Image: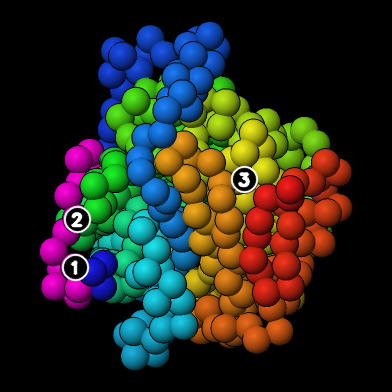
Amino acid sequence: MKLIKYLTLVAIVTLTGCGGTTTEQQQSSSQSVNDSTAQSQAAKPRISGTVTIAMNGDMMLGSIKPNRILPDNDGKDLLRDSREITLNADVACGNLEGVLADDGSTRKAPGPLSFSFMMPTKYVNLLVAAGYDFMGIANNHIYDFWDAGIQSTIKTLRDAGIGVAGTKDCETSIKEINGVKYGFCAFGHEDYSLKTQDTATVRRVITGLRPQCDILIVCFHGGAEGTGCRHVPQGKEYFHGMDRGDVRQFAHLSIDCGADIVYGHGPHVPRGMELYNDHLIAYSLGNFCTLGMSTAGQTGYAPLLVAKLDGYGYFVEGKIHSFIQGHRTGPRRDAANLVPKDIRSLTLDDFIDNKLDIADDGTIKPKK
């Protein structure tokens, strides 16, 4: 059914494209309100049955500026191996690492550590064809081409029927899919995005969104970068002197405020997972489809996480689908299942009181 909808370009009903700040949300900033909101929402099931949510990390499908890095076949083969999974999930989410625009000037000075990414607007059709419902844009590349790049990205995604969230003028998105209202919000570590470090804003946004939806999904861009940053530390992380947030604190706060599931990206490598108060947290799903970026070692690991939630939003079971990126290709199936084995090892190392069983094939279940 979802495939038919996307191929015929019939948009699923979007209730709220970009949510701003309301008086009701502002009144929800105290911790006591946070606690009562989360508890009242958990008092009875919000939906009957279960739902499946597909989630992945960074996506940069090709760039026309400042350097031209475009895929073969106009990108139609990039998501060929993963498309069936995202189409078959009830809802699919990713992180758009760059802007969707057709012109503009980068705000960054040239140099070996200067990266800017502008995907042509027509590439939004690749996301539509793969069944994506939401894109987070709270990351360190959404401002590569100034405010015009952000606005072009928001408009392009919304016009295509994809919910978008993560900046100060586009905080949340709500979509009704098959009778279930999904709320989505995204946080990053830069001043132009909603920040993981701004706990008052985190509380306000999530508690304001909670009563408006049945299932609430939170994604975040946080943590230091690179193969030396695969573990989830205690406390804040810094990268090139920049505060990248305390991702454990942020993820726990998000669930305490009413999130049903939390997933992260930003380190460019996978990290471990945690079951917190019966809700799943994936601390980094790494890169997924990042054309032109490094895919050496674990930076090429491309997990696609599918989680099943019950009517209360609690985690029932899931699977880490194992993909690996090659040079200038999208995610390709990994028959050796290297990715879930890596995530299991990291989970065991970083979470002593681990409550998840992760099998060799990527199946995830709560420990009994």
Residue 151 in view here: no
Q: Please determine whether, in this image, residue 359 is positioned above or below residue 331.
A: above
Q: CA distance from mark 3 to mark 2?
A: 27 Å
Q: Please report contact status of discs 1 and 2: CB closer than 8 Å, yes or no.
A: yes
Q: Please report contact status of discs 3 and 2: CB closer than 8 Å, yes or no.
A: no
Q: Amino acid at mark 3?
A: Ile
For the residue pair 265 and 35, the one nearer the viewer reads as: 35
What residue is rendered at 33% in x and 48% in y? 164
Mark on residue 5? 1
Q: CA distance from mark 3 to mark 1?
A: 30 Å
Q: Please determine whether, in this image, residue 214 is positioned above or below residue 21.
A: below
Q: Please determine whether, in this image, residue 166 is positioned above or below residue 31.
A: below
Disc nearer the start of the sequence (3/2)? 2
Q: Which residue is mark 3?
A: 281
Residue 219 point in image, percent of width and height: 50, 45
Colour logic: rainbow
Q: Amino acid at mark 2?
A: Ile
In magenta segment, residue 78: no
What residue is rendered at 26% in x and 73% in y? 3
Q: Please report contact status of discs 3 and 1: CB closer than 8 Å, yes or no.
A: no
Is 341 positioned to the left or the right of 59 in the image?
A: right
Disc nearer the start of the sequence (3/1)? 1
Tell me the quarter of the image containing the N terminus.
bottom left
Residue at disc 2, secondary structure: loop
Q: Which residue is mark 2?
A: 12
Residue 19 in view here: yes
Q: What residue range appears in magenta? A: 4-17
Q: Amino acid at mark 1?
A: Lys
Residue 311 point in image, percent of width and height: 43, 41
For the residue pair 97 and 209, the one nearer the viewer reads as: 209
